[in-house]
Structures are given as structure tokens and as C-alpha cells.
């Protein structure tokens, strides 16, 4: 497992620490760093986030190593763009939240970039000024989110 060496920014289990390689932040998203320094060839590369930099790294390394988890550029676009995810879900008749009416509250997230449940804004749509990389949806209030990752 690899993680960025960011001091105490991340809560890492003591049980997992022996299995984690902490990388300098300037090398974390650099595929060449892994290619030149890994002493093995991975069969699987799994990134459990949809941030653009991490998923692009996963994509480039999976192509280089021809991993079993390799995916194509269409999947990369889907994995890293909320607008593309919304478009595909609509094509498949999977309901998604709309952009809301002028009197609604909306949530503003980055379409591409960094997320993970942080960095978003909730505003009244009538006060919203669009930016190029925004992805908006009607805001719904909820108590909590549950996320589960299972690696076998």
C-alpha cells in the first residue's frame, strides 16, 4: 500500500503501518516514480477514490504494467468526471439528483479534481455564479454517509 507522507494528516492504523510505503508528496502522483522504484510488477492496482490525479495515476500504471484491473480511457472519463457519471446514469435510467429550481438549495462540487466528501459548498441556486469545473445538484439534507471498500 502507498500513501502520501503528509505527517499526521492521515489516520493510519498501527496494524497497517508495516505494510504502507509513505511517499514524498511531490512523487505521489508521478507514474514514473513507481515504474523506476517498484521492485515488483503488480497484477492489480486499486484506487478507491474518484479524484482525477489518483485515478489518472492508476490508469497510467495499469496500462504500463498491463494489470488485471486495467481500464480504458472511456472508463477513466467516467471515473473522474461527475458530469460524465451523471450523463451515463441518465442514459441507463438510473435516477440522479437534478440541478434544482431557482428557489432550491444546491450543492456545488468539483466536476474533476479532488473531493472525497470535502470542498463542496451548499448555496441558494439564485445566488449561484457558475464556474467552469463546477458540478451542481439539488441539495438534500442527510444525516450521514456510509462507504465501504472490500478488497479480496
Image (spheres, helix red, strand yellow):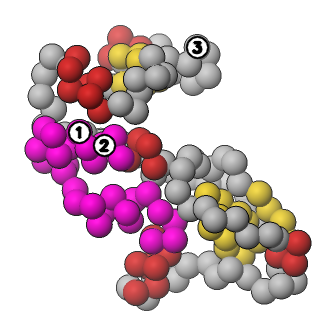
Q: Residue 58: which disc?
A: 2
Q: Where residue 30 sits: x, y (%)? A: 35, 30
Residue lying at 57% horizontally and 24% vertically, measured from the top left: 10
The residue segment tinted magenta is: 56-84
Q: Is residue 56 above or below residue 91?
A: above
Residue lying at 82% horizontally and 71% vertically, measured from the top left: 128
Q: Are marks 3 and 1 in contact (CB under 8 Å)?
A: no
In the image, which is nearer the foreground, mark 3 or mark 1? 1
Q: Is residue 78 magenta?
A: yes
Q: Is residue 15 left or right of residue 60?
A: right
| Alpha carbons under labels 3 and 2: distance apart | 23 Å
Q: Where residue 82 sits: x, y (%)? A: 51, 65
Q: Secondary structure at mark 3?
A: loop
Q: Where residue 95 sits: x, y (%)? A: 52, 83
- The residue that disc 3 covers is 7
Residue 15 seen: no
Say which quarter of the image contains residue 96: bottom right
Say which quarter of the image contains residue 79: bottom left
Q: Is residue 28 left or right of residue 33?
A: right
Q: Where residue 150 sits: x, y (%)? A: 34, 45
| Alpha carbons under labels 3 and 1: distance apart | 26 Å
Q: Secondary structure at mark 2?
A: helix
Q: Quadrant of the C terminus?
A: top left
Residue lying at 62% horizontally and 50% vertically, measured from the top left: 117
Q: Quadrant of the N terminus?
A: top left
Packing grade of label 1 (10 A; few <14, some 14-19, many >=20) is many
Amino acid at each position: 500500500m502507498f500513501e502520501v507522507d503528509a505527517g499526521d494528516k492521515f489516520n493510519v492504523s498501527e496494524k497497517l503501518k508495516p505494510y504502507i510505503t509513505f511517499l514524498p508528496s511531490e512523487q505521489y502522483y508521478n507514474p514514473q516514480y513507481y515504474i523506476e522504484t517498484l521492485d515488483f510488477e503488480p497484477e492489480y492496482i486499486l484506487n478507491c477514490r474518484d479524484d482525477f490525479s489518483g485515478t489518472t495515476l492508476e490508469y497510467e500504471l495499469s496500462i504500463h504494467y498491463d494489470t488485471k484491473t486495467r481500464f480504458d480511457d472511456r472508463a477513466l472519463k467516467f471515473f473522474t468526471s461527475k458530469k460524465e457519471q451523471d450523463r451515463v446514469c441518465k442514459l441507463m435510467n438510473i435516477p440522479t439528483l437534478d440541478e434544482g429550481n431557482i428557489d432550491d438549495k444546491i450543492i456545488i462540487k468539483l466536476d474533476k479534481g479532488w473531493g472525497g466528501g470535502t470542498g463542496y459548498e451548499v448555496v441558494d441556486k439564485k445566488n449561484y455564479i457558475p464556474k467552469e469545473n463546477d458540478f451542481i445538484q439539488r441539495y438534500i439534507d442527510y444525516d450521514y454517509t456510509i462507504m465501504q471498500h472490500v478488497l479480496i
